[in-house]
Amino acid sequence: MRPDLHPGDEAIHEYFGLTYANYLVRPRTLLQSMPGEWQQRFVQLLNELEAAFEHEPQAQRYHVQAEQWESPMSWTGARWSGWARP
C-alpha cells in the first residue's frame, strides 16, 4: 500500500478490479429487496457522496441499457455472413 493511503482507501478501486468501467449500475429491484436497515445505510452513503461532490458538474440523467458482450472470435458461419467492416 502507498504510504499516503489509509486502510480502505482503495476499496472501490479493488472492487472494480482490472475493468475499465467508470460506472456502477445495480438493479433497483435488488436494492429494494435488501433489509430496511441496509437500504437506510445505502441511501445515507449515497447522500454523503452527493453532498461531497455537489460543487462538481453532474449529468442530469443517464441512459443505461443491459447488454451481453460477445467476442466476434466466438461467432460461427451464419453470424459472420451479416457482418461487414465499418
Image (tube, rainbow, N blue to C red):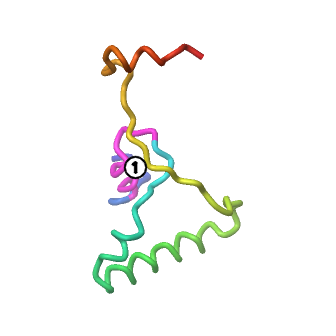
Q: Please give the range of residues in magenta.
A: 9-20
Asked if residue 3 lies in the magenta stretch, the reply is: no
Residue density around tag 1, few if under 14, some if 14–19, many if 20 or more, within 10 Å? few
Asked if residue 17 lies in the magenta stretch, the reply is: yes
The image shows residue 18 at horizontal and vertical percentages of: 36, 38
In the image, residue 57 above or below residue 44: above
The image shows residue 59 at horizontal and vertical percentages of: 67, 59
Q: At 71% from the left edge and 60% from the top edge, which residue is drawn?
A: 57
Q: Give the quarter of the image for residue 85.
A: top right
In the image, residue 48 above or below residue 61: below
Q: At 39% from the left edge and 39% from the top edge, which residue is drawn?
A: 19
Direction from residue 62 to residue 72 in the image, left or right: left
Q: At 44% from the left edge and 57% from the top edge, which residue is drawn?
A: 25
As rendered, which of 72 and 84 lies closer to the eye?
84
User: Badge 1 is on which residue?
Assistant: 13
Direction from residue 56 to residue 76 in the image, left or right: left
